[in-house]
Image (cartoon, rainbow, N blue to C red):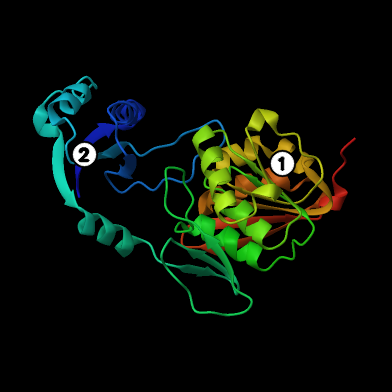
Amino acid sequence: MSWLEVSIRVRREQAPLAELVLEQQGALAVTLEDDGDDPVLEPGPGAMPLWPLVHVRGLFEADAARDRITRSLQCISGVTRPSLIRWHELGDQVWERAWMDRFEPMKFGSQLWIVPTGMQIPFEEDNIEIHLDPGLAFGTGTHPTTALCLEWLDGQDVRGKCVVDYGCGSGILGIAAALKAAQRVVCVDNDPQALEAALENATRNGVANRVECLAPDAYCETSADFLLANILAEPLVELAPILLGSMKPGGAIVLSGILEEQAGMVTEAYRADGRRIRQSEREEWVRLEVQGLHLVDKS
């Protein structure tokens, strides 16, 4: 069986419409990619950041109506000429090979592994396998910010604890905590698609009975032992009162999605009352660990 892939390049503000048009025309999958060299992180609560120029791809079955799809895409501002819409035929083996070349098992710390479908890792008794494939929601462990969080989580004893994954995307951090025997995991995201993906991934990994998925307006946690928020610097600053208020005495907050030059402003938002903040770096990204939360006044 073969497939058809259509691709167009649009401005950031047109990307949601292009994605919607492709979905309405029956696309089996839609991907958004950087059309330049402008890195973007997992979307933060209340925001959906994209690159200035976005390459939008839609995957269709081989007999899809090209003319109808092309006409629909031409309704998007800036996509008026058929030459701006490109079609490619993909065979099964080509599609499978492209996926396999990009994703492979990844290890974080001493125990945590992300293992895509159909792949295996060397057997070690203490290995913890997170079975996760790339999907519509962000968060497969490939970005340095996610890796920083997974490596921190690998070194923590979360058995019997409550862990919050705020801005969960695919749910990868919450699922990792549940696989490390956390008693309760709360995944929070503003994107319903991300919450659906997180729950599906939790089910796939056998931990759905300990994972709760919530939109931000439904979140009211006040007794978390650990909270991880891998989003963006500005939302982290805005969310400081909510995230700090989520913690029980002695808890720890891990913040990521922060560029090196942004670390100072995020640190200031969480430093009050003598809290200790430890900083780690990978490439140009920073992870902050907020400690000393027994000093927080929740009255």
The residue under the point 36% across, 28% down is 16
Identify the mark nearer the N-term, 1 or 2: 2
Q: In screen coordinates, is 290 left or right of 88?
A: right
Q: In screen coordinates, is 285 left or right of 228?
A: left
Residue 285 appears in view: no
Q: Tell me the crowding category of disc 1: few under 14, some 14 to 19, or many 20 or more residues within 10 angstroms, Cα based.
A: many
| In-front residue for pair 154/89 | 89
| Residue 205, position as x, y percentages in the image | 58, 56
Q: Quadrant of residue 190?
A: top right
The residue under the point 87% across, 38% down is 298
| Residue 216, position as x, y percentages in the image | 64, 32
- Front: mark 1 or 2: 2
| Residue 159, position as x, y percentages in the image | 77, 62
Q: Which mark is residue 7?
A: 2
Tag 1, which secondary structure? helix
Q: Tell me the crowding category of disc 2: few under 14, some 14 to 19, or many 20 or more residues within 10 angstroms, Cα based.
A: some
Q: Which mark is residue 243?
A: 1
Q: Residue furthest right?
A: 299
The residue under the point 52% across, 55% down is 145
| Residue 7, position as x, y percentages in the image | 21, 39
Q: In screen coordinates, is 285 left or right of 293?
A: left
**Amino acid type, residue under disc 1 in the picture:** Leu
**Amino acid type, residue under disc 2 in the picture:** Ser
Residue 76 appears in view: yes
